[in-house]
Amino acid sequence: MKNIVVLVSGGGTNLQALIDAEKRGEIKGGKITCVISSKPDVYALERAEQNGISTRVIPRKEYSDVSSYTKAVTEALLDEKADLVVYAGFMTILDEQVVKAFPYKMMNVHPALIPSFCGKGFYGLHVHEAVLDSGVKLTGATVHFVTEVCDGGPIILQGAVPVMNGDTPEILQKRVMEQAEWKLLPKAVSLFCEDRITIKDGKAYVD
């Protein structure tokens, strides 16, 4: 069984999707063993505790720079013997130290169809605001490996979600979560734990 460690910063809706999928037996070959938060007192920690998952808090504000914070998180992940690291609403930027320690062993879900509406500044509602401003008719979510490039790692899975007339960023965010993020992330995690993802020439292939 692979050890899955989930990084969080807030409410933990994607964490909940993973917990629920694990309970349904949809994550094969892996188990969520720890949840690490960049902030204390967030609801994601409660979700973990309610489900008997150990937690750690490594507050970002206690570290003077990205490098020292990344070192602390990387050491915690190594200590937890993480086989897979999942970013689930983790709003803190880490540097290349963690990427080198866990090459192609970290994944993130982004609320748009990469390479559109991604990169620096595109997070949370900002993504959905940009989608609505552009007038595109389809958006969605992307699960990708985390590399040094923000939202630039190999794409594992994508799912499309329609943009409707009258959508607000909040309404669209909810639809993308329900129809794409909460389905794709557990699926990608299971594929990793089943050793069904291979990287070739910087691209991810699922068998």
Image (tube, rainbow, N blue to C red):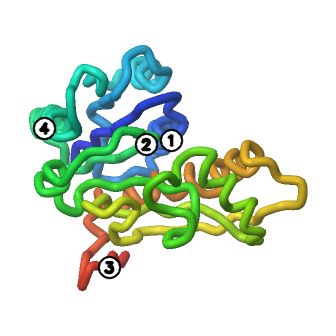
Q: At numbered mark 4, what does the secondary structure look like: helix, strand or loop?
A: helix
Q: Type of residue at label 4?
A: Lys
Q: Residues within 10 Å of mark 1 (few under 14, many from 20)?
A: many
**Mark 4–mark 2 CB contact (< 8 Å):** no
The amino acid type of the residue labelled 2 equals: Ala
Q: Is mark 1 on a helix, strand or loop?
A: helix
Q: Residue at x 42, y 31 (%)?
A: 9
Local crowd size for mark 3, using a 10 Å CA cut-off: few (<14), some (14–19), many (≥20) = few
Whether pointer 2 and pointer 1 mark residues with C-beta atoms closer than 8 Å, the reply is yes
Which of the pair 64/12 is nearer the observer?
64
Ranked by sequence position, the earlier of labels 2 and 3 is 2
* Image disc number at residue 203: 3
Circle 2: is it few (<14), some (14-19), or many (20+) Cα within 10 Å?
many
Marks 2 and 1, the one that precedes in the sequence: 1
Reading the image, the residue beneath label 1 is 14
> How many angstroms separate mark 2 from mark 3 (CA)?
22 Å
- How far apart, in angstroms, are the residues tagged by discs 3 and 1? 24 Å
Nearest the viewer among 125 and 19 is 125
- Quickly name the residue at label 2: 88
The alpha-carbon separation of the residues under discs 4 and 2 comes to: 19 Å
- Report x, y in % for residue 5: 28, 39
- Compared with 77, 99 (above or below) is below
> What residue do we see at 36% from left, 59% from top?
150
The residue that disc 4 covers is 71
Residue found at the very far bottom of the displayed protein: 201
